[in-house]
Each structure stands twice: as structure tokens, then as C-alpha cells.
Image (cartoon, helix red, strand yellow):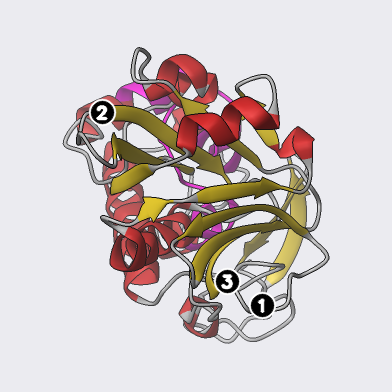
Amino acid sequence: MPELPEVETVRRGLDRYTLDRAITGTEVLLPRTIAHPDTPEEFSFGLHHTKIQTWHRRGKYLYAQLAEQDTQQPAGCLGVHLRMTGQLLWVESSTEVHKHTRVRLFLGKDWEIRFVDQRTFGQMWWIPPSQQPEQVMTGMGKLGPEPFDPAFSIEYFAAKLQKSSRNIKTVILDQNLVAGLGNIYADEALFLSKIHPETPANQLAFAQIELLRESAINVLQTSIDSGGTTFSNYLSVEGTNGNYGGMAWVYNRTKQPCRVCGTPIAKMRLGGRGTHYCPQCQANSAG
């Protein structure tokens, strides 16, 4: 599943190409992709002749503020969640339509946004101007603070971790705790903090928690600067790969030598997630 850096990369690409462009038409090729309103026809009617003002990201959700093309009055929002394999691609309308294309949004005669989704778990919403995005995209209202938000303070983070005896890897993947931190960057942040992923959260010393918070923020920023990590079906809106994977410390490097100590990177499953770590660098982490 695309994580915060990948979704932020997509958001920036959409801002680059689609702002102030009118949505002149839509084609819904897989009706169940539309989570709201009830029918593809209502979705298309809500978007028709609106203009994209700006794109926002909240956790792994994307939503665009819309305005009426003629009056500039608020026209609601267009929401998207990529889920496991979703892609939002900015393409010329003459480009051959991929078999996994689920929704097409036409922005003028020559260009369009295509929502391509192999596994079909991705969703799109039209939120009317009378409602806030989190009222319709209900999962968004349950998210914790963004990693870059001042609300994700060391005091907040420490207080949350001290209340849980679950392993630290599982705890920091909880989107109610912090929004957007997923499997890849949890592994990376734990490595940089020298914390074993099985360590109970409430056994970490304050200094370790502080380092983990800083490491999570830094690794997310590094990945954003690199255009994210290419894995599975992730592509930017231009159809290009992310570059973070080539510099990853542990993620997807099973049996390869640790970049610090040379010990082969190990992999196990925690909470149903593949978890990468260095048995040497992360051996003794409990405070």
C-alpha cells in the first residue's frame, strides 16, 4: 500500500498539473470504486464543470477542493484513497486505456486523470459543499496527528507508547496514533533508532522514544524528497518510479548485509506484516 511519502508525491504531482483545470467529464468503468454518492451518475454530476483549486493529503487520503467553473463558488471535494494498488496518472486522453483503469476524469479535450487499480480496493468520493471531507470519508476523521504536525510532540508520543504493552512495530503502525506511517517507514525508523521491532512499547526509555520520533520524521522526509519508494504498483502521476528503495536501510533487503554492521538483514512477521530488521544493530533495545 502506498504510504505517506508516496501519497504526498502524488499530491504534489496533481497540484503541479491539474490546478485551475475544469473537470469536463467523467467515465466510471468500475462502479464499486465510487464510495460516495450512491451511484456513478451522481458522482459524475457532482464533478461536472467544477474546477480543481488545490489538493490536500491527510494521512494516506487525498482530496481536492473544487469550485464551480463559472461562479467560483465552493463545489465540494473530490476524495481518493489508493489502498493497495491504486494509481492516479496524468495522461493524454489519446493514451491507450489500461485494462485496470477504473475511473477517468477528463480535464479539457487532451488530458485526464486516470484512476488505475489492479486489486480494486481503491475508492473515490464526491463530497458536496454542505459536508466536510471527514464526514464522508469517515476513516479520515479517526486519524492521529501528522508526523510533521506540532501535535505529534515527544510528550504526546511518549504518553501513547507508555500505555501499550504491544510490540513497538505494531503500535506505530496504528493510524490513530500517527497518520501515514506504514510498514516500510516503520521498519526504517526502528532500524535508525536501534530498536528491535518486538520490543514492548512501554519498555522503551524516553531517550529511545525521542530518537524514534525523530527517525520517523526524518525517514519520511527523505523518502518524500526521493519521490517515495517504488514497490508493487506504485507510480507517481507522471508514471515514474520512486527512488527511496535504493537507499533503504532494511526494508526489502532480506539476507543482504546491513549497511552499518554487515549482518544479514532478517525478516519476520509481526501483526501479519513483513518486518525487516538487523539482528545485530537492533539486538538490545529495551530500556
Query: What kind of residue is marked 3?
Result: Leu
User: Mark 2 or mark 1, which is nearer the start of the sequence?
Assistant: 2
**Mark 2, secondary structure of its residue:** strand
Give x and y (percent) for residue 276: 65, 63
Taking the spot 36% from the left edge, 52% from the top edge, the residue there is 22
Query: Disc 2 designates what residue?
Result: 74
169 drawn magenta: yes
Callouts 3 and 1 close, C-beta under 8 Å: no
- In three-dimensional space, the C-alpha distance between marks 3 and 1, rounded to whole angstroms, equals 21 Å
**Closer mark to the observer between disc 2 and disc 3:** 2
Is residue 189 something one can see in this rendering? yes
Taking the spot 47% from the left edge, 77% from the top edge, the residue there is 244
**Mark 3, secondary structure of its residue:** loop
Q: Quadrant of the C terminus?
A: top left
Query: Is residue 145 rendered to the left or right of residue 5?
Result: left
- In three-dimensional space, the C-alpha distance between marks 1 and 2, rounded to whole angstroms, equals 47 Å
Is residue 162 something one can see in this rendering? no
Give x and y (percent) for residue 89: 55, 66
140, above or below 206, in the image = above
45 drawn magenta: no
Give x and y (percent) for residue 154: 22, 35
Callouts 2 and 3 close, C-beta under 8 Å: no
158, above or below 14, in the image = above
**Closer mark to the observer between disc 3 and disc 1:** 3
The image shows a total of numbered marks equal to: 3
Taking the spot 46% from the left edge, 27% from the top edge, the residue there is 202
Query: Disc 3 designates what residue?
Result: 235
Residue 253 tag number: 1
